[in-house]
Image (spheres, rainbow, N blue to C red):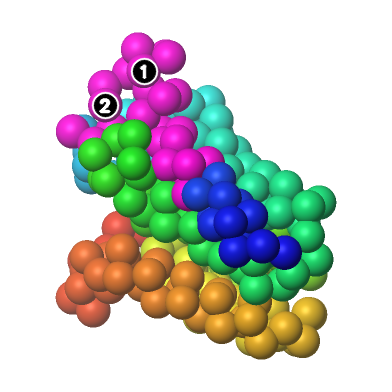
């Protein structure tokens, strides 16, 4: 595969990720801009606070699919694992820093899981299961996400035996932790809100 094609796929992934589902959903449904309401985060949790379950569900699905779709497109074009890994990372970074929305994006949990599904459904299922288990025990969504994504590179390595994918997942996890730094501080202070509160 040519370098130009790899770059084009990476740009495609970033542009997919740059579509802020939360902002689009809120505009279509005439809800307040999530970047200026609640937590200020354009993600499903904040949309839930602003508009309720349906807008939040639409945001969650959209964020998930914009991680999966570009990876599946890349897999249909090439079997180059490094290129497929790059596309997934680009889509994730597009969600965190969207070109079309002033580089103010979400925290990446749904999009990261969508990318992971495109790479390996087994690793995605294990990661989602880990999130669910930790969330049920602690009722802390952010903590569950942090723990699940900490395990995700290992799950991906076990499922694919691909060093490129596992390393890229590790980079994705580091970026996710960075975006959750305020949540980490709240968790350490015992101030993070539990699910349902």
The local secondary structure at tag 1 comes to: helix
Relative horizontal placement of residue 152, taking residue 177 as reference (left or right): right
> Which residue does the numbered mark 2 point to in the structure image?
33
Which quadrant would the N terminus be assigned to in this image? bottom right
Q: Nearer the viewer, residue 132 or 79?
A: 79
Residue at (41% x, 36% y) in the render: 20
Quick one: label 2, few (<14), some, or many (20+) residues within 10 Å?
some
SS state under label 2: loop
Rendering quarter of residue 187? bottom left
Residue 180 drawn at (x, y percent): 31, 65
In this rendering, the answer to whether 103 lies above or below 55 is below
Q: Is residue 62 magenta?
A: no
- State yes or no: discs 1 and 2 in contact (Cβ < 8 Å): yes
Q: Main secondary structure of the magenta part?
A: helix
The numbered mark at residue 27 is 1
Sequence-earlier tag: 1 or 2:
1
* Magenta-colored span: 14-36
Q: Is residue 26 above or below residue 71?
A: above
Badge 1: few (under 14), some or many (20 or more) residues near its Cα, within 10 Å?
few
């Amino acid at each position: 595969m040519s370098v130009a094609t790899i770059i084009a796929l990476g740009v495609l992934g970033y542009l997919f990720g740059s579509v802020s589902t939360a902002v689009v959903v809120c505009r279509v449904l005439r809800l307040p801009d999530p970047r200026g309401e609640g937590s200020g985060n354009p993600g499903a949790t904040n949309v839930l606070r602003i508009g309720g379950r349906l807008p939040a569900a639409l945001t969650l699905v959209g964020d998930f699919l914009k991680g999966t779709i570009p990876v599946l497109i890349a897999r249909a074009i090439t079997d180059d694992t490094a290129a497929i890994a790059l596309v997934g990372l680009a889509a994730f970074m597009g969600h965190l820093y969207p070109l079309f929305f002033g580089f103010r994006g979400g925290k990446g949990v749904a999009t990261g899981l969508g990318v992971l599904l495109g790479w390996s459904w087994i690793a995605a299922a294990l990661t989602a299961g880990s999130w669910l288990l930790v969330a049920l025990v602690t009722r802390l969504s952010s903590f569950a996400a942090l723990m699940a994504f900490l395990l995700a590179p290992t799950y991906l390595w076990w499922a694919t035996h691909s060093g490129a994918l596992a390393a890229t997942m590790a980079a994705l996890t580091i970026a996710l932790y960075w975006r959750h730094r305020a949540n980490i501080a709240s968790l350490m202070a015992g101030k993070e809100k539990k699910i349902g509160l």
